[in-house]
Amino acid sequence: MALKVCFLIRSEPEWGIKPDLLFAAYINHGALERLSFISIEDAENEADYILGATPQRWKKLLTKESKFVGDFMLGRVTVDKGSKPGVLNLAPYTTNFVEALTPVELQYPDQMTQEELERYRAYLAEFREELKV
């Protein structure tokens, strides 16, 4: 089974995310084919699913403070492309996916000092410009 999922990180200027940012994970028969940031145009053209949430919600999912199914059912994670029943078919794999994305401890903007946050925002702006995402 081939599956192309993009994760939309909604704009959050305080975190340096402006405009929205997308992250792609394309899997083909269990093999990861793509794991990268992606433009909105490419995501709309290529992805089977685009799932959207605030960066704070993605943080809660990646730090295991909340569960995907619960957040999805409560509308905290939205389906911006694809079908809701199709997303529910993905639910059993979300724990494994989170584990694969978080082999190291991550630092989030709300955990940074003001100086670290300013450096992060500048880095993110440069990164986005370079990748055109």
Image: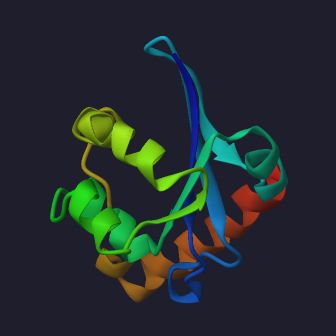
Task: Decide if residue 85 is on the left or right side of residue 110.
Answer: right
Percent across and percent down for residue 70 are: 22, 64
| Residue at left offset 68%, top offset 41% | 47
Q: In which quarter of the image is the C terminus?
A: bottom right
| Residue at left offset 18%, top offset 64% | 66
The front one of 12 and 47 is 47
| Residue at left offset 46%, top offset 75% | 54
Percent across and percent down for residue 111 are: 29, 76
Percent across and percent down for residue 39 are: 78, 53
The front one of 33 and 49 is 49
Task: Decide if residue 45 is on the left or right side of residue 99.
Answer: right
For the image, the number of numbered tags is: 0
Task: Decide if residue 52 is on the left or right side of residue 125.
Answer: left
Q: In this view, does 116 lie above or below 40?
A: below
Q: In this view, does 30 lie above or below 86?
A: above
The front one of 12 and 107 is 12
Residue at far front of view: 85
Q: Can residue 102 be seen in this view?
A: no
